[in-house]
Image (cartoon, grey):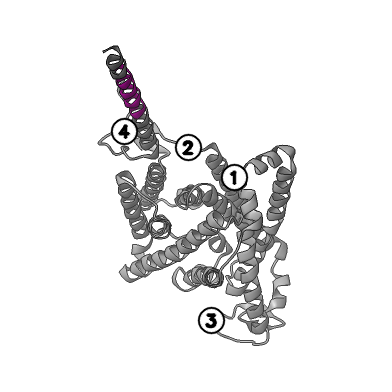
Amino acid sequence: MKKKCCLSFGKCSKKLWLLILASFITNIALFLALYFFTMNTTEFDSLNILSYLFFQNLCQSFMFIPHLISKKMNASRRNSPISKNIEQSNSSSIFNESSNSITFTLQEKLYFIFFIFLKLFTEIFLITYLFFVFENRTLTYELTFSFQFELICLFLLSKLFYNNQYYKHQYIVITIVTIFEIYWCFLNYLNKGAGYFFLTVHCNIIHSFLRSTIISYIKGLMEYKYISPYKICFIFGLLDLIIVTIVYIIASFFPCEGYLCLEEYNGKKYFGHILSIFDMNIFKRLLFFTLKSILLVLNYVIINEFSVCHYFLPIKINQLFENSLWYISFGFAIDDVFFKLIIASIFVIFGLSIFCILLFLEIIEINCCKINYNTKKNIEKRAVTDLEFDDLNFDNNTEDSFNDNNVINDE
């Protein structure tokens, strides 16, 4: 009998890797745009809460364009002769459900409104963290910063909301990844003091929980209400854009001199002035935030096609890429050996985290100590084996009964 290798590949969809590749390419485009457009300039160094929220939600609302394209393509598909025959033969087709049966109860409408505000609050929480805790106001951090504990939050919320069943190998992996995330925070923030470290960890946990809650709700909208990822992105973006624009217009009437009053218009400072948007290199900002919105939609597509936990894989791959760029830009210029060891350990953590996520998603399997016993692949194999065994028993019982009847007839 051939000995099984310790590591093997499980089930992996080609579509998943294509989506991850698209996410990675978009992330590279975002970084290249940031590098070339912000090189040798300080015009983007000032982080402003309202301008960030305005451009982010405006560009998310642009996702109505791929939504219309997708809708037109689906309509063409439905109108084709083959699709019409399939639809007639299957009255419960998803096309029928998605086009005719989307209804919201009053409670569901209230939930929807709540999550509109929760998304906006989560975005404000991120900027506030960058502004007051992280103390970095550059556009690069505005667009690329991400928190760490989303996988554990998605894991817990998917069990709570959707009763997803997980097994021993996934519990082991989620524990290891969580330890890695805490250690990553330890390496990055402990040199600023224990108080700063614990504050950062708490902010990470809060923001990760909020984002994961929104992601879990969006997964429900796509799975049970058949709303496309593009439509969800532009509806949430458009409604939050309306709220932000109203606040922006109100703030435009009140000059101020406080710590948050960074927008300058006609020689006066404001918390936000709606007309100052046109002095902010609007086309560059539209490019940056549109690329970020495309990344968001790609994540939604991954969630829709697979699971909420699959969405964490491209995030980790993009984080590894971002840290690699940072090290190439700054790490080689620093001669401190201890610093380079810390950087190397961060890369090891990201690499192991990606490996663990692949184990969690059962893209890679460990074939020892029965760790892979309850993977989907092996559960399906056992189900097929049991079915074949039941069929064999049925055939044997049928043959025995036939033989018994023959004996009785001969007598």
Kindly indicate whether the residue at mark 1 contacts the one at mark 3 (C-beta within 8 angstroms).
no
Query: Which residue is under mark 2?
Result: 12
Q: Mark 1, mark 2: which one is toward the viewer?
A: 2
Q: Is residue 109 magenta?
A: no
* Quadrant in the picture for the C terminus: top left
Residue 21 position in % (x across, y down): 56, 42
Q: Residue at x 49, y 71 (%)?
A: 125
Q: What distance separates the C-alpha of mark 2 from that of mark 3?
A: 50 Å
Mark 3 vs 4, N-terminal side: 3
- Neighbours of disc 3 within 10 Å: few (<14), some (14-19), many (20+): few
Work out whether residue 20 or residue 393 is closer to the camera in this orientation and state it.
Answer: 393
Disc 3, SS:
loop
Q: Residue at x 34, y 55 (%)?
A: 178
Kindly indicate whether the residue at mark 2 contacts the one at mark 1 (C-beta within 8 angstroms).
no
> Which amino acid lies under the numbered mark 1 shown in the image of this protein?
Ala
Q: What distance separates the C-alpha of mark 1 from that of mark 2?
A: 17 Å
- Neighbours of disc 2 within 10 Å: few (<14), some (14-19), many (20+): few
Marking on residue 22: 1
- Neighbours of disc 1 within 10 Å: few (<14), some (14-19), many (20+): some
Examine the image and state in which quarter residue 198 appears. bottom left
Examine the image and state in which quarter residue 248 appears. bottom right
Q: Residue at x 39, y 47 (%)?
A: 353
> Which amino acid lies under the numbered mark 4 shown in the image of this protein?
Asn
Query: Which residue is under mark 4?
Result: 367
Marking on residue 75: none
> Which amino acid lies under the numbered mark 2 shown in the image of this protein?
Cys
Q: What distance separates the C-alpha of mark 4 from that of mark 2?
A: 17 Å
Query: Which residue is under mark 3?
Result: 259
Q: Mark 3, mark 4: which one is toward the viewer?
A: 4
